[in-house]
């Protein structure tokens, strides 16, 4: 039976869920068969919203001409043609076309790279198919699929609820409703408005609480959000801050270029030079000031950075994150799974009265003895069994034994809950039998605000019992009838366990009580009986300690933000080096009592924030930003989403992270490892430093050309370079090098330098010093050779050709100089960047064609140079390299890193 698609034609909210299932030929307990899924995929296509049409090569090519710079070149070509310089006009147009082709190729390559990376972060959903639970890409959903939803899940398609437990969904993206909407499966009148369809969940929204099964009724463009998406087709992603800064930077350069044009025209006409010659040179000089290769280089740098980060386990979801990473000064990290292995093991039990039990063994294999005071525990100890049976029933995880394809025990669900099942198996609890004998009748799902969950169970003919587990301070508030001594002892035991870096859970029971859909934890206060505490160990990751040390060396401060007890967090933080001797921890209650001024004052010494709720996480981020920090925040749950969105760089966990967290984040790390975040920060610094290298190279080239021309005009010499030669160096020689210079690998010292200032200028004092250091030798070599050869009465075309070649050679040597401000290019440079090697080879080959191919001799006003005559030119131009090597050697000898231009003196 074909599955209908239109939500308008089929008011699913007005149907009973059983009728909706029948109409879509589905099964509430088994889902669709693989054959049905395949057939419906063919009928309805992928569950995807319209994507912007892929831009053709022609469109990309035409985009390269949308620049005031290109318009100026077209005017120059027209003027050259009008004055009879058809060769010059052809060269200008040819160079413009060559630049456009290079830009088209590089922009298309960047688009393909980013499209491939977007596929890596596609939404995953859980469905019932062929009678079993499966995780599939949301793209593969079809009408009739049975969705399994839980808190933190993003909804992959419009769906009709079949059953639910305390379900709530955030629908602000669709309806504008600012608070989560409670849901239930009852049928509604057909005229019910979209915002009031409480028995439906919609694509693009997410689940904030509870669990549910739901029948997919519409996918792709037929969903409610699909209808909206059709209205927004053609919208473009906004430019990144760096792109905007480069655009603004370009405007300033255009003003400078116009000023230079006026100066060159005035000087040339004052000298009595032909108007056409002066005009062409002036236009060429104006072009030389504008680094036309910079936008393409920036696009490639960001795309390459994304690819390299993906290779190291960090998937970039927002391009702006690449540039922000290099500026991060604080990383706020979750503890469990990010700083630790997320391999929870219950190692200690505590019972009212002070009795303690130790549990041996690690991992998920239920192997290990229970001991009390060093002696083996008697089988079926009543107090122990009562506690461990409770954590089996109040638990959503599954423990799976080794099978045909598995060689070890594995788990489904939360590792913390799985560890409780392992402890129960070690004590002899038969999990499946117990759950069958005491089925769950109702529940209050875990909530990050209450930090508890509760389930209600009825035995065979017996009364209902409620089991509660959660944070000790939360559960103990429900046990107020237990007496002061018991509660005091429990609090002391929880603190003692937390001080040993154990994650502590409290467990309680309420007899003769049944939960309902409306039951809240406030109604349970004073009714609960404390069963005991469980302490879980989660070993720190070995590599994190090294990563934390790297952070501190790089001027980045790590802060732990954890849902655990404050003492547990502090113990782990001290082990990893996050908390120093003078640092302290603050829990949610203490943070609530602190004013904003007190928080700002205390931030320097707070290394751990514990038991904080979502609004407090946002407050922590905002407090750090208020004092000038650039903040990265990690998270995995629904409650982390606001802080992830507010942080400068939100980092979601790829393994344990909910879809909500991933949607709010700019980066997803695939291995949930803190060390991967640090690696991404390092790569962000590499990207920014490579862009600075490109800017340095482009400006050194431009300044060289301007000064050589101005010296000729001021000293009465003829033009040392033809206009087309200047254009060739600006657009061809530069382009073959800049797009490859951004491919430079890390220098190795990125994580020993201070973070990039938030508003670092593209042309700062450091850059000006480097330009001042690199320019003079190239100008002296180029203009000096020109003046000397003029004095020998040689052919003007030959002299210009030699001058043109000296200047090109200086740029080739300078690209090696620009790779580092302190390390020798002879030991450090080109061989480590195969892309730059290729760019140099291509540039040399093109220049040789201009020198030795007769058709190009006429176009570029060049004359062949004998191979023997090239050697003095190479030797002269290499002085650019040797002088810079001398400067670098002096800097290294002094060992004064503060004197290095790359140490970033204050920007101007």
Image (cartoon, rainbow, N blue to C red):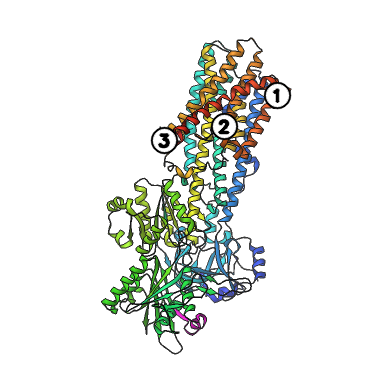
* Viewport quadrant of the N terminus: bottom right
Q: Quadrant of residue 792?
A: top right
Find the distance from the CA under tag 2 to the CA under tag 3: 24 Å
User: Of the residues under marks 1 and 3, which one precedes in the sequence?
Assistant: 1
Contact? badges 2 and 1 (CB < 8 Å): no
Task: Using residue 779 as the reference point, say whether residue 623 is left or right of it.
Answer: left
| Residue that mark 3 sits on | 898
Q: Residue furthest left?
A: 484
Q: Secondary structure at mark 2?
A: helix
Picture coordinates of residue 177, whole percent (x, y): 42, 61
Name the one closer to the observer, 572 or 226: 572
Question: Badge 3: how crowded within 10 Å, few (<14), some, or many (20+)?
Answer: few
Residue indicated by mark 1 = 856
- Figure quadrant of residue 850: top right
> Residue 563: which quarter of the image?
bottom left
Circle 2 residue = 815
Q: Which residues are magenta?
A: 428-441
Q: Nearer the viewer, residue 749 or 563?
A: 749
Q: Secondary structure at mark 3?
A: helix
* In-image side of 457 versus 232 (left or right): left
Q: Is residue 429 magenta?
A: yes
């Amino acid at each position: 039976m074909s599955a209908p698609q239109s939500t308008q034609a089929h008011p699913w909210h007005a149907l009973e869920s059983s009728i909706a299932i029948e109409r879509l030929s589905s099964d509430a307990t088994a889902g669709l068969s693989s054959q049905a899924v395949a057939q419906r995929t063919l009928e309805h296509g992928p569950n995807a919203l319209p994507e912007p049409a892929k831009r053709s090569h022609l469109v990309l090519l035409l985009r390269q001409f949308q620049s005031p710079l290109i318009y100026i070149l077209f005017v120059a070509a027209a003027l050259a043609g009008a004055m009879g310089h058809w060769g010059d006009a052809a060269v200008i147009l040819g160079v413009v076309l060559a630049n456009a082709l290079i830009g088209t190729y590089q922009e298309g390559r960047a688009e393909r790279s980013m499209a491939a990376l977007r596929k890596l972060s596609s939404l995953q959903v859980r469905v019932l198919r062929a009678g079993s639970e499966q995780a599939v890409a949301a793209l593969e959903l079809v009408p009739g699929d049975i969705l399994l939803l839980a808190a933190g899940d993003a909804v992959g398609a419009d769906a009709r609820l079949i059953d639910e437990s305390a379900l709530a969904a955030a629908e602000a993206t669709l309806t504008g409703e600012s608070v989560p909407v409670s849901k239930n499966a009852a049928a509604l009148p057909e005229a019910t408005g979209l915002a009031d369809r409480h028995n439906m969940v919609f694509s693009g929204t997410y689940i904030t609480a509870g669990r549910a099964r739901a029948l997919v009724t519409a996918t792709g463009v037929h969903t409610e959000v699909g209808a909206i998406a059709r209205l927004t087709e053609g919208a473009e992603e906004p430019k990144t801050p760096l792109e905007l800064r480069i655009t603004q930077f370009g405007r300033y350069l255009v003003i400078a270029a116009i000023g230079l044009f006026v100066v060159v025209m005035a000087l040339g006409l004052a000298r009595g030079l032909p108007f056409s010659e002066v005009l062409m040179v002036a236009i060429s000089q104006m072009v030389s000031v504008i680094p036309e290769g910079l936008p393409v280089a920036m696009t490639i740098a960001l795309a390459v950075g994304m690819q390299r980060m993906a290779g190291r386990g960090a998937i970039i979801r927002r391009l702006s994150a690449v540039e922000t990473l290099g500026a991060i000064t604080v990383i706020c990290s979750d503890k469990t799974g990010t700083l630790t292995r997320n391999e929870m093991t219950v190692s200690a039990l505590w019972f009212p009265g002070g009795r303690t039990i130790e549990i041996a063994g690690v991992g998920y294999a239920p192997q290990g003895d229970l001991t009390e005071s060093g002696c083996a525990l008697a089988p079926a100890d009543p107090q122990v069994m009562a506690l461990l049976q409770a954590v089996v029933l109040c638990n959503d995880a599954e423990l799976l034994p080794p099978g045909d394809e598995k060689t070890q025990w594995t788990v489904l669900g939360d590792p913390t809950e799985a560890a409780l099942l392992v402890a129960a198996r070690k004590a002899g609890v038969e999990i499946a039998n117990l759950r069958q004998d005491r089925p769950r009748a109702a529940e209050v799902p875990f909530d990050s605000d209450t930090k508890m969950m509760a389930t209600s169970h009825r035995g065979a003919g017996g009364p209902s019992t409620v089991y509660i587990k959660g944070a000790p301070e939360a559960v103990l508030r429900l046990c107020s009838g237990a007496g002061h001594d018991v509660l005091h002892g429990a609090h002391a035991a929880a603190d003692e366990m937390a001080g040993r870096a154990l994650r502590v859970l409290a467990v309680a029971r309420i007899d003769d009580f049944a939960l309902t859909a409306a039951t809240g934890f406030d109604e349970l206060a004073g009714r609960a009986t404390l069963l005991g505490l469980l302490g879980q160990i989660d070993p720190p990751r070995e590599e994190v300690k090294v990563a934390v040390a790297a952070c501190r060396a790089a001027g980045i401060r790590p802060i732990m933000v954890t849902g655990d007890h404050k003492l547990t967090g502090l113990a782990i933080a001290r082990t990893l080096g996050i908390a120093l001797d003078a640092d302290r921890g603050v829990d949610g209650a203490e943070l609530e009592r602190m004013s904003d001024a007190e928080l700002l004052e205390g931030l320097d010494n707070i290394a751990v924030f514990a038991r904080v709720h979502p609004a407090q996480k946002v407050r922590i981020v905002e407090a750090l930003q208020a004092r000038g920090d650039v903040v990265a925040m990690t998270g995995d749950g629904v409650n982390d989403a606001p802080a992830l969105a507010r942080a400068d760089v939100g980092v979601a966990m790829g393994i344990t992270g909910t879809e909500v967290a991933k949607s709010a984040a700019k980066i997803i790390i695939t291995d949930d490892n803190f060390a991967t975040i640090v690696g991404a920060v390092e790569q962000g610094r590499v990207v920014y430093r490579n862009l600075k290298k490109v800017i340095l190279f482009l400006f050194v080239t431009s300044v060289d050309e301007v000064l050589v021309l101005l010296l000729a005009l001021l000293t009465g010499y003829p033009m040392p370079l033809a206009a087309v030669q200047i254009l060739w160096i600006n657009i061809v020689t530069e382009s073959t090098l800049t797009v490859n210079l951004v491919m430079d690998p890390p220098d190795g010292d990125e994580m020993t330098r201070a973070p990039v200032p938030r508003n670092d200028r593209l042309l700062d004092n450091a850059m000006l010093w480097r330009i001042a250091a690199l320019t003079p030798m190239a100008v002296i070599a180029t203009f000096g050779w020109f003046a000397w050869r003029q004095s020998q009465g040689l052919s003007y075309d030959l002299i210009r050709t030699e001058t043109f070649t000296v200047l090109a050679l200086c740029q080739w040597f300078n690209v090696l100089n620009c790779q580092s401000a302190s390390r020798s290019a002879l030991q450090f440079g080109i061989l480590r960047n195969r892309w730059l090697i290729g760019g140099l080879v291509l540039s040399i080959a093109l220049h040789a064609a201009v020198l030795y191919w007769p058709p190009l001799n006429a176009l570029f006003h060049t004359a062949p140079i004998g191979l023997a005559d090239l050697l003095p030119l190479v030797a002269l131009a290499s002085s650019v390299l040797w002088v810079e090597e001398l400067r670098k050697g002096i800097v290294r000898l002094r060992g004064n890193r503060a004197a290095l231009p790359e140490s970033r003196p204050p920007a101007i």
